[in-house]
Image (spheres, coloured by chain):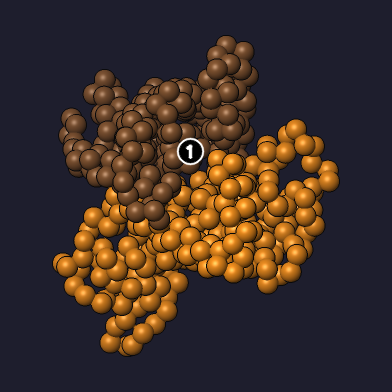
Chain colours: A orange, B brown
Amino acid sequence: MKIGEQFKEGLITNNPVLIQNIGLCSTMAITTTFFNGIGMGISVLIILTCCNVVISALRKSIPNDIRIAVFVVVIAGFVTIVDLLLKAYVPALSKSLGVFIPLIVVNCIIIGRAEAFCQHEPVFPSFIDGIAQGLGYTLTLVAMCLVRELLGNGTFGTGVFDLSEKGLRIVFDGSGSGIRLFDSAFGATIVLMPVGGFITLGCLFALTNYLVNKAKEKAGKTDAGVCACQITNEEAAK
Amino acid sequence: MAASLISISLGAILINNFIFSQFLGICPFLGCSGKVDTAVGMGIAVTFVMGLASAICYVVNIILVAYGLEYMATIAFILVIAGLVQFVEMFLKKTIPALYTALGIFLPLITTNCAVLGVVLLNVQNNYNFIESFVYGITGGLGFMLAIVLFATVRERVEFAEYPKSFEGFPIALVTAGLLSLAFMGFSGMKIFG
């Protein structure tokens, strides 16, 4: 498989959250500030890439019956490493993500990619797959954060961008106040509550569905036969 | 003691419901809520695993602390949970085969249910003792069951409703869950026994 194709799959056509619908817990729970979103996204990206490489390298020696247990141990190992690193170097992120960092162990994206991709493919494609899928996840988180933060608090990039008299700075310790677009008194706090998480993600999924349907219709005009065949196949699968 | 147990229980079931306010266990919540019967079965299985996992992991944590191995906690807990789920799977296969088939792929996936690992980690974080951990596990599971059963009943009705085509499937389910979570927000901020 081509590298470009893998990236296209991870980011758009087979995006882990939007198309595969996995890893939803963290997507809704931590996307309240830009800092959280990007921190979580990068942590998952690193863990996913490392796990993909290790599992793919070991794929011939893992017995099929206990493969899930082996995957989980590998994943838990890397999650512990990242957890300890965050505690040591980015304590603000570790504190604000709380229990969701160790919970990356049970994030379906990592175990799903191990099961669906790495146990059949060589190391290099698995490495690229980890980066591509991790980026897809990060982008979705960032999109959620931008919407929720803007509607809920009226800011952009809280924690990462800092706008003060000295000008615009980029900080990595979560202390940035963000770029204020309107007063927080006008923000709908409910968007930052759990309710907002569910509904924002619902709307994001609906948007994805709309775009997928549009793309299918467009494809239908040029090649109606193939498309209709695909749709009936999908319905049969349901 | 009794007061703290009641406050933990009500907190886990209503005020800080695992699904609606902590976002733990969303995958089975969305995947297993098509029918009320399946939802009840899933709820019972998860409650059972959560209660047992809390109790066993409390002991495991004591051993880890005694040997100064706290950093191994995540790995140790997930292995205990994986073992427990395997046990529940074999048990259900022997005793209630109908439920076993109905739960299907979601049964082994309880291992990767964040609510189970989440409750264990929260127990450690909150410094609960043995009884408190066990009660938090059981009531957290009951809160999960309440959420999934409520959601399944609503979802059965939503199937007959009219909504935009783009919202079919997951999107409308998430919006429904959002509205339920709004209802549960009414409990937030409640304090029991100070």
Mark 1, Cα crowd under 10 Å, few <14 / some 14-19 / many 20+, is: few
Identify the chain of the residue marked 1, using the numbered disc in the image. B
Q: Camera-side residue: B191 or B64?
A: B191
Q: Quadrant of the N terminus of chain A?
A: bottom right
Locate residue A227: give its quadrant: bottom right
User: Looking at the picture, how far across and down is residue A13, in whole percent?
Assistant: 58, 62
Q: Position of residue A213 (x, y in %)?
A: 48, 60
Asked which secondary structure carries label 1, the reply is: helix
State the image coordinates of residue A71 (x, y, percent, origin top left). Answer: 68, 43
Q: Is there any visible trace of residue A228 in the rendered image?
A: yes
Left or right, B16 with reference to A88: left
Q: Amino acid at mark 1?
A: Gly
Q: Is residue A178 above or below residue B132?
A: below
Query: Looking at the figure, which quarter contains the C terminus of chain A?
Result: top right
Q: Position of residue B153 (x, y in %)?
A: 33, 30
Residue A201 in view: no
User: Is residue A113 shown above or below A158?
Assistant: above
Residue found farthest to the bottom: A166
Rendered image quadrant of residue A164? bottom left
> Residue extending furthest right?
A60
**Residue visible at 65% across and 51% down in the picture:** A113
Q: Is residue A72 above or below residue A123?
A: above
**On the image, numbered disc 1 is attached to which residue?**
B31
Figure disc tally = 1
Residue at 23 percent of width and 55 percent of height: A190
Q: Is residue A238 above or below residue B104?
A: below
A48, A214: nearer the viewer: A214
The residue at the point 32 percent across, 88 percent down is A166
